[in-house]
Amino acid sequence: MQRNRNEVIPIKPENDLPLVDCHNHFPDKEPYRKPTHSDEEQYDFFFNQHKGQFIISSASDWDYDYIQNYIQAHENKYMTMGYNIPSERYNRSFEDLKVFVDFLKNNKDKYVAIGEFGLDFHHGKSIKMRETQVEVFQKIIKETKSLNKPYALHVRNPTQRNIDQNFPNHEYNQRDICNRIVLEKLVEEQIPPERVMWHCFSGPAEWGPKLAEKGYYISIPSSAYGFKRWRRNIPGVPIENLLTETDACLQHPFRMGAYNTPANVKYSIAAIAYVNEIDQLEVAKKVLENARRFFGVK
Ligand SMILES: [Zn+2]
């Protein structure tokens, strides 16, 4: 399905901005969307045809080695270490979790942040599965906080369609429940807000300014350019708290389901500039500064 939505903003993204893609899955080991260009062409788009500065890729257990090898062979490319959130689709054992945490402890120099991991009450359907997610989330934070690495969190709240019909009144069906739990656990474990990025921030919109005020980073996906539901989370978040990402191969700027590439992070910049009525270059410079600070990349 690749239909255009008529929600695209009336400005064009600029091509000579200092870009940073703070979260993607590039290069994809087993792409489930058909790539439009080879890995090398996408790398070239970002660093040579645009003024891309650096790319942060999220690896998970099945592609650690693959992404690690790519990073070693390419400049300005860094990795975060993620853990698949348990759901009815991904069964995870506590043994998997132990392997993950041990890897993090023993390979500190190989990655710049921990994530993505978090809560997903869209894919976690039952209350029981959601409870497991919360347990796993807290365990990862507890076991890794002494590593002093930034966290890239995936936080997806349930929609009306994701209500567990066996327990329709359970609080785990509420529209901002994942935000609330994540915030509560981060505070409980005393994680400094400036060490946390809410990747592909999906709202609800009133949460953006609220989280930014506490010092968290909010990452805006390239799809904010063409989809109101992503763009509406930008207003009220100071530029100092914003990061940009493509989540490639996901989050295409204006098409549903189309393949996305890191250079499209320029569409996130355009969306932020449009909403705040400021220059794209000014946004890009600020976001680059934020990203360098957050990931500790020189
Ligand atoms: Zn992702």
Image (cartoon, rainbow, N blue to C red):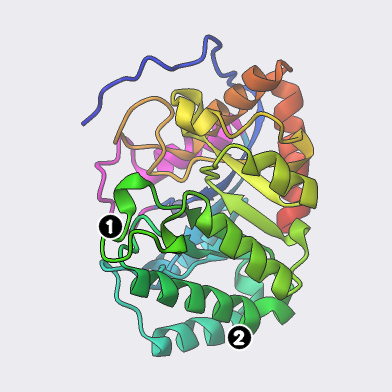
On whether residue 2 falls in the magenta region, the answer is no
Q: Which mark is residue 30?
A: 1
User: What residue did someone put label 2 on?
Assistant: 106
The span from disc 2 to disc 1 (Cα, nearest Å) is 27 Å
| Quadrant housing the N terminus | top left
Q: Quadrant of residue 235?
A: top right
Q: Nearer the viewer, residue 60 or 172?
A: 172
Residue range (magenta): 28-51
Residue at the spot 76% in from the left edge and 72% down from the top edge: 190
284 relative to 34, above or below: above
156 relative to 5, above or below: below
Residue at the spot 26% in from the left edge and 60% down from the top edge: 165
244 relative to 268, above or below: below
Q: Amino acid at mark 2?
A: Asn
Q: Earlier in the sequence, mark 2 or mark 1?
A: 1
Q: Nearer the viewer, residue 132 or 15?
A: 132
On whether residue 44 falls in the magenta region, the answer is yes
Q: Amino acid at mark 1?
A: Glu
Residue, far left: 1
Tally of numbered tags: 2
